[in-house]
């Protein structure tokens, strides 16, 4: 079996490439010129430079008749200063790679979307929930819904594709997502704990679901990948315990976080620099966004057996092993 992977140099992509290789797949991994390919530069992986914004480079990179194309790449920007590039990456880029997948007779395209494509709901989100991500002020959510629509346009022209909607992904190879919480807590730089909650899923289980979606997913279907529901207070308390740091005991009120975000946004208009807390980030971390994985469990065999502490322990231990995070000696010893 042959797979083409976009976003392989990223956090989830590296987990997926690792599992594809373990299953005996041959992997062609796309990367941008100058990107760090160390996580996936392994036997069995062919690295090819290309850009989602350059359809001719994609046509040259995607092998004719490859069995599966896993479109994992995404721009997760949460600041309006990056919105134009995010549209090009997420929406136009998804349209380009889906078109090339159809033109090159790819067996099936597996699209890594996001729970964000469903927007904000007061209730637990399922695949039957309407996709409400229609406010361009929440631009990441807005583009994830429209990226799905761009791929669906190619399904209408004959492409076979399936969509996965992960929640908050936690695990090894992460340096820029939830791993940032480790760095803040380790450096005593955590400004506060937001009052929201979310569903957290284990990177290895999410990667396995991608392979299962190739084999078992329904054409054009969405599959939500959730896991352990937790408040952000519980999330940060778990990280603090894993680092041997004092656990935070209370959350910062939502109105305070949103006010800080608005003020920071005004300042960014003068400085041109992205603030630490943007209105889009504030909206996300002050809400309760939880979801159900029932369909993925039933149709893909998706498992959610890894608890939050296990996910975060793997993330911590990988960061320590890479020399990116240091622990007190007693904590390091206890993790062995």
Image (cartoon, helix red, strand yellow):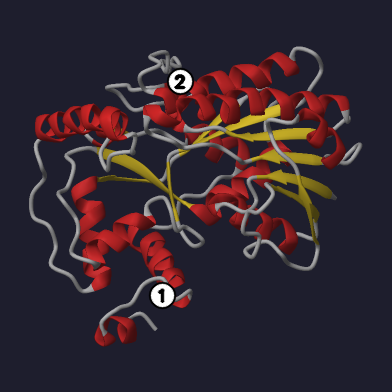
Looking at the image, can residue 283 be seen?
no
Percent from the top left, x then y, of residue 158?
Answer: 81, 17
Q: Is residue 227 above or below residue 85?
A: below
Identify which residue, 289 or 78, lies in the foreground. 78
Where is residue 252 shown, x and y percent of the image? 10, 42
Residue 71: quarter of image: top right
Question: In the drawing, what numbered circle is on residue 142?
Answer: 2
Which residue: 14% across, 49% down?
A: 192
Q: Where is residue 80? Give x, y as percent.
A: 38, 27
Location of the C terminus by quadrant is bottom left
Please name the residue shown 65% across and 54% down the image: 34
**Which element carries disc 2, helix, strand or loop?**
helix
Q: Name the residue under label 1.
A: 320
Horizontal arrangement in the rendering, residue 333 relative to residue 163 (left or right): left
- Cα distance between the residues tagged 2 and 1: 35 Å
Residue 126's x, y, as percent?
Answer: 44, 26
Q: In this view, does 170 lie to the left or right of 210?
A: left
């Amino acid at each position: 079996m042959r797979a083409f992977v976009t976003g392989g140099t990223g956090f989830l992509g590296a987990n997926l490439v690792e599992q594809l290789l373990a299953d005996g797949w041959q992997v062609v991994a796309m990367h941008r010129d100058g990107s760090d390919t160390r996580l996936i530069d392994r036997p069995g992986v062919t690295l090819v430079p290309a850009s989602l914004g350059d359809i001719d480079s994609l046509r040259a990179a995607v092998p004719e008749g490859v069995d599966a194309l896993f479109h994992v790449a995404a721009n997760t920007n949460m600041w309006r200063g990056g919105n134009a590039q995010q549209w090009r990456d997420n929406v136009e880029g998804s349209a380009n790679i889906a078109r090339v997948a159809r033109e090159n007779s790819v067996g099936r395209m597996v699209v890594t979307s996001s729970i964000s494509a469903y927007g904000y709901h007061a209730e637990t989100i399922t695949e039957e929930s309407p996709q409400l991500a229609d406010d361009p002020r929440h631009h990441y959510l807005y583009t994830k819904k429209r990226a799905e629509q761009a791929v669906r346009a190619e399904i209408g022209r004959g492409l076979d594709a399936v969509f996965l909607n992960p929640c908050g992904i936690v695990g090894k190879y992460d340096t820029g997502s939830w791993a940032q919480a480790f760095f803040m807590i380790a450096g005593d730089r955590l400004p506060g704990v937001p009052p929201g909650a979310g569903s957290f899923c284990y990177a290895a289980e999410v990667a396995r679901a991608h392979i299962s979606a190739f084999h078992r997913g329904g054409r054009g279907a969405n599959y939500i990948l959730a896991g352990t529901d937790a408040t952000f207070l519980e999330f940060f308390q778990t990280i603090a315990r894993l680092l041997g740091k004092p656990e935070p005991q209370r959350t910062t009120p939502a109105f305070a976080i949103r006010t800080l975000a608005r003020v920071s946004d005004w300042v960014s208009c003068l400085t041109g620099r992205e603030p630490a807390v943007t209105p889009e980030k504030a909206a996300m971390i002050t809400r309760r966004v939880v979801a159900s994985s029932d369909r993925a469990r039933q149709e893909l065999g998706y498992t959610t057996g890894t608890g939050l502490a296990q996910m975060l322990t793997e993330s911590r231990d990988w960061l320590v092993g890479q020399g990116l995070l240091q622990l007190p000696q007693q904590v390091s010893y206890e993790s062995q």
